[in-house]
Amino acid sequence: MALLGIYGCGGLGREILELARDINENNQRWDEAFFIDDVRRAAEINGARVRSFEELRAFVAEDEIEIVIAVGEPAIRAVLREKIAGAGLSLSQPLIHPSAKVAKDAKVEAGAIVCYGSFVSSAAIVKSSALIQPSVCAGHDVTIGENCVISSFAALAGACSIGDNCYVGMNAAIREKRSVGAWSIVGMGSIVHSDLPEGVIALGSPAKVVKKNENRRVFR
């Protein structure tokens, strides 16, 4: 039996459940998709069962389950990824919506998600547990780091680099060959013309550093 555990049952979790169902309609991958939540709020959500992380070993073998993280905070994605690995469980193979376009020479790593209508171009790399939300354009030779969240309608031009654990807001744009350092946040609608260092929050057009991302959180 092939199982998909969706870690997080909030709004993003429900979206990932729909994505998984769309994938299954196109190409059956899982016998069941269910939610994993450490604070159980319901026995079932949108027709999918809810289980705690501690319950997993009691009902399923390690080789039967793969897990995808459905939390929009990069720092929490990083923590959950370590927790999954520490328990000897595996991240899912990439979840790519049937409507998304991923170039044949692009690389999308385990646990990564590419949502509805997004485009990942030639030789781009989407690293483990990164989340590309709907209608994102990731240009050729782009690198998107581990646990990153790239919000809807963002555009990453050719050969730019997004460091691990970054958050790029909706409608943001990154100029070609520019880099965003790890743990940085690019605000909604911001236009990045110059490299950004690690651990900062940048806003505006052109994007300017407004302060350090001291607590490493997007949603406060």
Image: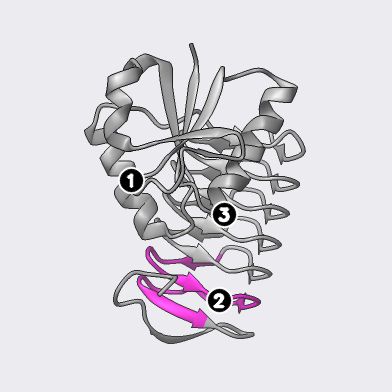
Q: Secondary structure at mark 1?
A: loop
State if disc 2 and disc 3 touch (CB < 8 Å).
no
Q: CA distance from mark 1 to mark 2?
A: 30 Å
Residue 179: say if magenta: yes
Q: Secondary structure at mark 2?
A: loop
- Residue drawn at point x = 37 percent, y = 15 percent: 63
Residue 11: which disc?
Answer: 3
State if disc 2 and disc 1 touch (CB < 8 Å).
no
Left or right? Give the position of 186 relative to 86: right
Give, as a three-letter code, the residue at label 3. Answer: Gly
- Residue drawn at point x = 66 percent, y = 45 percent: 115
**Sequence-wise first label, 1 or 3:** 3
Read off the magenta span.
Answer: 178-202
- Residue drawn at point x = 58 percent, y = 69 percent: 169
Query: In front: 44, or 101?
Result: 44
Q: CA distance from mark 1 to mark 3?
A: 16 Å
- Residue drawn at point x = 44 percent, y = 71 percent: 219
Residue 136: say if magenta: no
Residue 187: which disc?
Answer: 2
Give, as a three-letter code, the residue at label 1. Answer: Asp
Left or right? Give the position of 195 relative to 165: right
In the image, which is nearer the foreground, mark 1 or mark 2?
1
Q: Position of residue 79 (x, y in %)?
A: 30, 50
For residue 182, what is the image quadrant?
bottom left
Kindly tell me whether residue 141 is visible in this rendering: yes
Q: CA distance from mark 3 to mark 2?
A: 21 Å
Q: Mark 1 — residue?
A: 38
Is 189 placed above or below 128 here?
below
Where's the C terminus, which quadrant? Answer: bottom left
